[in-house]
Amino acid sequence: TSSPPKILLKKVSESDISKKKRKIESRNKGSVSQRQIQVGDLIGDVKVTDINFARAKVQLIDKAFFGANIRARIHVTMAEPIAAKPKLSKQEKKAKDEHKIGKSHPFYSWKAGDVIKGVRCVAVDTRDGVSFVELANRSEKSDLVSSSPIVVSDPSQLPPGSLVHSIVTSVSASSPHFGVWVQVCPGISGFVPALELSSDPDILNDIESNYKVGTRLSCCVMEKSNPEKTPLRHQLQRDDHDNNTKEHNALELSVLLAEEQSNAKQAGFKPTKPQRGDVVVGRINKKMRVLGPPALMLNLRGTFTGRCCITELNDMDDWANMPLGKDPSNDSKSGSNEVQRVVSDSEADLSNNENDDDDEESRDEDKAKSEIREEYPDGKFIKCRVLGSARAKGAVELSLRDSRLEGDLEEDCVPEPNDMTHAYVISTTKKGCFVRISRYVEGRVILKELSDDFIPNPTVMFPPGRLVVGKVKRVTKHDGKQKGNRGLAATVDIDMRESVLLSSGNRITLDDIQENSKYTGVVTRIESYGVFVRIENSDVSGLAHVSECSDSYVKNIFDLYNPGDLVKVMVIKFDKEEKRLGFSLKASNFVDDDDSDDASLSDEASSSEEDSDEEEEEVKDALDERSDGEGDSDSDDENFVAKMAAKMEQAGDVHSDNDSESSDDSSADSDDDSESDEKSLEQRPEESL
């Protein structure tokens, strides 16, 4: 086996060691005697030897430092770009890309071998006979915050209110702390929240383009939040370029506070709570718990929270249906309530042939919907006007209306009875619907006044956020001292039926009804003992007993009529004391009428068993047509209110020539039902607010 290699060492005596030490000491003494470096000294010219993202190593080329044991560098926070445009080779550009040195970085125009002129000393540290020198080529004229120390060893040396320069090292896009990380000086880093960077939402919405790595920022040190009260996920984490400190202790900085101080404005060490009339920038946060839905929640400067009511998203003339989007939970609800129908083999074959076309159309619709840009996406920055403190504790009431931003802070007027008003749905139950007209005015609609047609599932038909139109029946104003009004200025009762909205105002009342008079009505309810009918253009309802529903024997009244059918009635009984009406639907009562309906005579066919099958088919067709018609009033229809407005305008032109006195609305058999519905809607659950 071969023996291991041996190392020969030169024998050195103690005298040789002492001679070498004396030689080094004499050389160091000679250099120090030539030039002692102190903070603030003008060093002169230096030559760049190496560059990375955080610092540039340099060599002192002044003859006064020749032979001195000095290591010098220029930190990125102490550097200024060279005025001359750099001519970099492909290899040099590649090296800068590897170090993430972009065009905004102070070192972008630097390269190894360049001579930096006018360098001065900002810090000196001597260890083991070696002098470590921090240099800067920034002129005093460019140092706008010369009152603050340029180099500190601990963040506590920069108290709240200190003005400092910093260099952007990275952009953080995570939701707990969205903003930019900066380097203040060697070993000291800081974080600037996005809302403390600028008051222009367009700049903040493209933060990566406007605050590129290497950009210099003038900041003010803010008061630090209490870490014991701050959740761990919201505490500042370590920056990628902060490798000098084991435990991260970043400064919390603000560009806006620095601008306020430079403009001689009274600025504290942290953002203050916005006051009524202030214009602020907020960041939409859809992960936050919504206060008083439907509403939009926003993060403001500091730790303040903002709430924008759905009625304050746009001016009333620009209100849109479902501005905050559709609640996915409503889709599951609607899907669970769909009625399944038995399909025959022939229908199944026909359906299979049409599946390909339907699938292609559905794909096109899904693609079109995906291309629609959401108006209020999560994380978007937007300008708001402060209206005051919200009813919910701790929140600030905001508005996104253009008129508010222009200075109009007046509250919306309370509607009067018989006014047509727009509103947004707050919540819907089996008893009715709650709506919001403005911040301080809410309304209610009982179930039977939601629509002229039968609504099988009101919660799906009227989801939160749907834009509706109705006629004000009654207004109850509050003085603020009443309990249970939740700070509202007024609550209103609204009627949303199309027949009410399109009426000219001279509606038929109970006083106008006379026996043996004939009217057109709509079937509202069917029972085994008869049919309930409401006279058109009125709230007057009555009962047609089963014996008065047809001239012939009725086997099953449910096969003869359906809710929503348009029929002709004749008043055969009128009890004024009880306010009850008795109707007759027999076709024989309308034989001599010039405008008799074929539909009113169709009940004669029920006497013949041969035509019963045809009648059943007609009923099925009517049901299919009505189910198809319900799709026209779906909550996703953006033109629902516009269509209704056009109908109302057309109806107004038709009725403009008719001058008649209007009287109060009254009802016969529906009085008890409406009173019970209104009582059930009197107390609104607080959680629905």
Image (cartoon, rainbow, N blue to C red):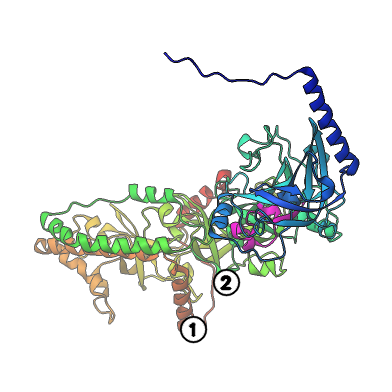
Q: Is 215 colored magenta in this rendering? A: yes
Q: Which residues are magenta?
A: 194-219
Point out which mark residue 433 bears: none
Q: Is residue 255 above or below residue 513?
A: above
SS state under label 2: helix
> If you read the primary sequence from the N terminus, does the residue marked by circle 2 or circle 1 appear first?
2
Q: Is residue 112 left or right of residue 621?
A: right
Point out which mark residue 658 bears: 1
Residue that sits furthest to the right in the current view: 33
**Relative depth, front residue between 370 and 47:** 47
Residue 674: image x %, image y %? 48, 55
Q: Amino acid at mark 1?
A: Asn
SS state under label 1: loop
Disc 2 to disc 1: CB gap under 8 Å: no
Residue marked by disc 2: 317
Q: Is residue 233 visible?
A: yes
Disc 1 crowd rating (10 Å Cα; few below 14, some 14-19, many 20+) is few
